[in-house]
Image: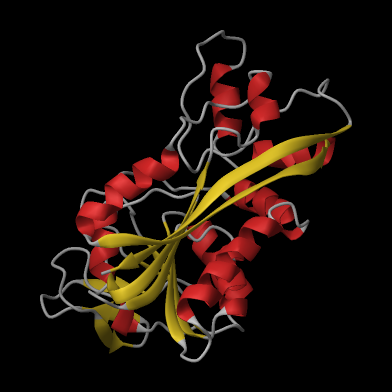
Amino acid sequence: MSVDSTWLRCPNCFQDLESVSGRTYGCVDGHRFDQARGGYLTLLPPRAPRTVGDDRAMLEARAELLDSGAYTPIAEALQRAGRDLLGGDTEVSLLDLGCGTGHYAGAVADAVPTRRMLLADRSPDAVRMSMRALAARAAVTGVVLDLWRPLPIRDASADVALDVFAPRNPPEYARVLRSGGLLLIVVPTERHLAELRASGDVLEIPAGKDAAVLEQFTPHGFALAGREQVEYAMSADLRRRSLLVDMGPSAHHRTATAGTSTTPATESDSDVAGVVDSDSGADSTVTVSVDVLALQKL
C-alpha cells in the first residue's frame, strides 16, 4: 500500500513529510521514517510511552462483535450525521482517530463519498486491520501515533474526523480539521452496559459525558451541529457477553483485580467492555446507550 504523505508532518519537528526514496519518508530537517511491511508508518514523538494500544485478541473480539450487528445502530447514527451535515456531492478526506478495526470509518465512507482516508491508532495491529478492511473503499494511509500528543498530521488536512470511544485531543483536532469540517464523536452514557455494571462487573461511567465533551471542544472553535442519543436493548447470550469483555480494557482490569475487593473505578471512553459472570444467564439483554455528537469547526 502506498502512503499519501500530504496528510503527514514530522512528529519531531512538525515539518511536512515527503517521500524520500522507496518506502522511506522524511522531512527537511533530516528525520526519516520507514514504511512497515503492513504498509503503515509509525510516527511517534520522542520519548513516547511504551504502550501498544489494543492487542490482536482484543481487536479480533471487537471485530466479531461488530460484524454480528451488535452496534449497527451506532454506525447508522454516524451515517445519518454525515449525510445530513455533509450532503453527498463532494468527496471528502476522512480521518479516523482511534480507528480500531476500521468498522466505523467504513460505515461513514459507505454513506459519504470518500476520496481518501487516514487511519490512526496507537496500536499497530489496529492500523493493519483497518487498512486491510478498508483498502477497497478509498485511498488509505495508516499511521501509528499517540493521540495525547501533537499529532503528526498537517493543518486543515481533513474534512471529516471520527472519534468513537477513543481519547480526545481538542486543540489538535481543531488544528487538523479544515474550517467548516465535521467532527463526529461517540461517547457512552451512564446507562451504557448498565446490566453488567449493576452486578459489579464493569467500571462506572460518569453522567454528563456529552456536556463535558462540549465543554472541552467549544473553546477550540467547535460548535454543536447535531446530536443523537442511541439507546436500545441488545440481545446478549454468553458468547456476546464474553466478547464485550475481550474487546476492551475491562478484561485487563478483571485480571488485575481478580480475588480482590475494590470500590468501582471510573471507566474511560475506550473501556466500554464488561466483565461477565458465567452465572449471569445464557441469554439476556444488555443496554447500549451512547451519545453521537456532531461538532463543526468554525
> What residue is at 54 percent from the left and 66 percent from the top?
128
The C terminus sits in image quarter:
bottom left
Whether residue 10 is situated above or below residue 110 in the rendered picture: above
| Residue 73 drawn above or below residue 264 | below
Using the rendered view, name the quadrant where residue 233 is placed: top right
Closest to the observer, 171 or 136: 171
* Numbered label tally: 0
Residue 291 appears left or right of 110:
left
What residue is shown at x 72% (from left), y 28% (from top)? 276
Q: Residue at x 26, y 54 (%)?
A: 218
Residue 79 percent across, percent down from the top left: 59, 70
185 vs 130, left or right, is left
Residue that appears at 16% across and 69% down:
14
Q: Residue furthest top?
A: 261
Colour scheme used in the picture? secondary structure
Q: Can residue 247 be seen by looking at this rendering?
A: no
**Residue 127 visible to an observer of this rendering:** yes
Name the foreground residue: 145 vs 156: 156
* Percent of width and height locating residue 196: 68, 27
> Looking at the image, which residue sits at the far bottom?
89
Residue 211: quarter of image: top left
**Relative to 108, 151 lies left or right:** left
The picture places residue 178, in percent across and down from the top left corner, at 28, 76
Q: Residue furthest right?
A: 282
Q: Is residue 199 above or below residue 180?
A: above
Taking depth in this image into account, of 255 and 270 the one nearest to the observer is: 270
Where does residue 279 sit, x and y in percent of width and height?
Answer: 83, 20
